[in-house]
Image (spheres, rainbow, N blue to C red):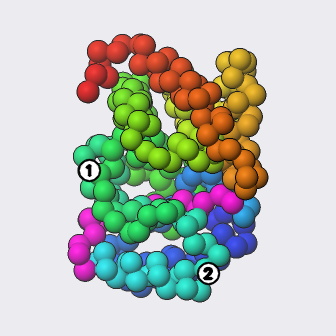
Amino acid sequence: MNPTGITDVDELIRAIRVGLQETLGEKLVGLYVFGSIATGGYEHGTSDVDLLAALSSDLSADDFARVAAVHEAVLREQSGWEDRIEIAYISTEKLRRIQAEDQIALVSPGEPFHFKEARNDWFLNLSILREHGLTVFGPPPHSLVDPVSAGDLTVVQRLMWEWREWITQTDLIHKRAYQGHMIITMCRNLFLWRNLRVASKREATAWAAREMPEWSALIRSALIWREGAVGEHVDQNATLPETLRFVHVVIDTILAEERTEATP
């Protein structure tokens, strides 16, 4: 089975699938590809591979240890994927309509395998999975995740409150690639807010550049920065003030409507 049609990605996915099926057995209900591969924005050699494992129940401590061993074994054989794999493990009960406080297990670029709260951003990830996800095996993703409704968009507002706090606390904003990530993410959030569907990076940024022509140059630059295409000796902070201005413009735009429903 070649779910993505990208040879090295499918080889990686096949190794992960075999390892998880041997380790989790019937507890593994399905395995799915989402993220840039599913939405058509994958960049060979730089983009991450985003996977979701649907489970009949949450991982136990023993499950967690054995799954961690699968991750380590796969990376020993395919070390070129180090820090470019995200795999979330979520029960089918939580997948149906995930809540911010739900616990999920996650391995992602730059982070070890760990348990964490889903928070509001995973609502958007599961929306992408439902509408664009590729099935490695298991039932179709739209049968596991409820669709996004107009009422669900209050989640986007709550996410904006989280972003407003997050950017005051993290040092990541001083990296040009992360600035690109922030700009693209805001484009996607605004697209979802206005159009009631999740868009790929390319579609959302093209739309945002048309909607906000005064920011079009910054948005185009963000696509380059996100892939790390900046020189080693570039002043990473030179673009930070403009980036933060754009981020706050989008946050304020989304929060301006029905603000009382989104107040934390």
Q: Secondary structure at mark 2?
A: loop
Left or right of 160 on screen, residue 206 = right
The residue located at (31%, 75%) in the rendering is 64
Above or below, 52 relative to 201: below
Above or below, 141 relative to 264: below
Q: Quadrant of the C terminus?
A: top left
The residue pinned by badge 1 equals 102
The residue located at (58%, 65%) in the rendering is 84
Left or right of 203 on screen, residue 14 = left
Residue 250, image x, y percentages:
53, 23
User: Comparing marks 2 and 1, which lies closer to the viewer?
Assistant: 2
Amino acid tagged 1: Asp
The quadrant in which residue 85 appears is bottom right
Residue 72, image x, y percentages:
47, 82
The quadrant in which residue 239 appears is top right
Q: Quadrant of the N terminus?
A: bottom right
Q: Which numbered disc, 2 or 1, marks the residue that appears first in the sequence?
A: 2
The quadrant in which residue 124 appears is top left
Distance of label 2 from label 1 (alpha carbons): 31 Å
Amino acid tagged 2: Gln
For the record, the magenta segment spans: 46-62
- Say whether marks 2 and 1 touch (CB < 8 Å): no
The residue located at (39%, 62%) in the rendering is 106
The residue pinned by badge 2 equals 78
Above or below, 41 relative to 162: below
Left or right of 114 on screen, residue 33 = right
Is residue 3 part of the magenta span, yes or no?
no
Q: Is residue 138 in view? A: no
